[in-house]
């Protein structure tokens, strides 16, 4: 097998960045979900509530994060900042500390996205705008221990795990099923993975315990990724071309036997190789779960 894609999503639920190479850190690929959008209560906001987040382009330059949108001048956020206000934020049932990027970022996000309206047009829980926060370097947000195997792991602002691994053959099988229904194929971008590999049969990844990548990186695949409505949305427009698809088809395919719902991809944690560089084209070798 080999790596075919490496992707990071510096700001949770905004557009991703495809990379030729990426550095593995304890929290996953460098800068992945390092920032997040929150509402006036500090609750995380994603494309589930605000599909238009998919229209915000993200760039990483040597010294700054740049957000772009057709209706506003670019927003530049320095990578190195000090003295930012600390606030408590929530991601599902987790609460953690974050650093507020300030009024300019808040005004920019609110100008291009509103106050986090829901996709059905209903008002969000709170009027008052959106804020951009970053994860404090010195903090740890622990991964749930239920599916770990004696190791510890921590992350920044992903839903729960530092990495998401997907398999190209699985996408191809899904697209075959969609074609049988007369529906268009969906791209891998719908699933927002960090690492994509190819080389084995469809959904072989449900049996993988570890994945060795390149020279010295080991990932532990620990929990199937249950998918939500974001996968029905085009990751450039935020629109849903076909209602409920491919979510509905994934449920029908029962891609994770014994688990109820739609599953695609595997949540993973770093086991070895922190600080090493992964590259598209690197070899990948899977160890089967005992």
Image (cartoon, grey):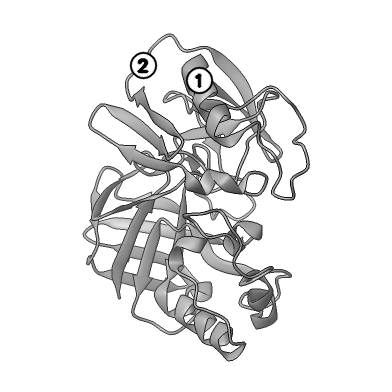
Q: Is residue 62 left or right of residue 67?
A: left
Report x, y in % for residue 112: 53, 34
Question: In the rendered structure, are the residues bearing label 2 and label 1 in contact, judged by CB atoms less than 8 Å apart?
Answer: yes
Q: Quadrant of the N terminus?
A: bottom left
Task: Give the residue at x 50% y 31%.
Answer: 140
Q: Quadrant of residue 244?
A: bottom right
Q: Quadrant of residue 225?
A: bottom right
Considering depth in this image, is 272 or 36 the residue closer to the camera? 36
Of mark 2 and mark 1, the one earlier in the sequence is 2
Q: Residues within 10 Å of mark 1 (few under 14, many from 20)?
A: many
Which residue was labeled with disc 2? 81
Instruction: Say whether residue 32 is visible.
Output: no
Task: Give the residue at x 58% y 28%.
Answer: 110
- Dot 2 falls on a residue whose secondary structure is loop
Q: Is residue 89 left or right of residue 127?
A: left
Mark identifier at residue 99:
1
Report x, y in % for residue 16: 41, 49
Q: CA distance from mark 2 to mark 1?
A: 10 Å
Report x, y in % for residue 224: 58, 64
Q: Residues within 10 Å of mark 2 (few under 14, many from 20)?
A: few
């Amino acid at each position: 097998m080999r790596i075919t894609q490496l992707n990071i999503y510096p700001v949770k639920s905004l557009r991703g960045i495809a990379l030729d190479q990426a550095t593995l850190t304890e929290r996953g690929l460098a800068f992945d979900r390092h920032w997040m959008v929150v509402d006036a209560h500090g609750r995380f906001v994603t494309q589930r509530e605000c599909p238009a987040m998919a229209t915000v382009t993200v760039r990483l330059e040597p010294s700054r994060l740049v957000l772009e949108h057709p209706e506003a001048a670019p927003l530049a956020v320095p990578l190195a900042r000090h003295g930012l206000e600390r606030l408590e934020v929530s991601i599902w049932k987790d609460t953690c500390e974050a650093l507020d990027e300030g009024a300019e970022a808040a005004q920019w996000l609110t100008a291009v996205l509103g106050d986090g309206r829901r996709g059905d047009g209903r008002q969000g829980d709170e009027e008052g705008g959106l804020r951009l926060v970053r994860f404090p370097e010195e903090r740890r947000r622990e991964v749930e221990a239920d599916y770990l195997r004696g190791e510890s792991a921590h992350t920044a602002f992903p839903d729960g795990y530092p990495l998401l691994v997907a398999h190209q053959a699985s996408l191809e099988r899904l697209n075959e099923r969609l074609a049988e229904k007369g529906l268009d194929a969906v791209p891998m971008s719908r699933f927002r993975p960090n690492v994509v590999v190819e080389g084995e049969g469809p959904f072989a990844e449900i049996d993988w315990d570890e994945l060795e990548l390149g020279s010295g990186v080991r990932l532990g695949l620990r929990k199937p990724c249950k998918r939500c409505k974001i996968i029905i949305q085009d990751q450039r427009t935020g629109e849903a071309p076909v209602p409920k698809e491919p979510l509905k088809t994934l449920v029908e395919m029962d891609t994770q036997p014994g688990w109820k719902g739609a599953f695609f991809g595997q949540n993973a944690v770093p086991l070895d190789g922190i600080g090493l560089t992964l590259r598209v084209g690197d070899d990948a070798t899977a160890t089967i779960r005992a």
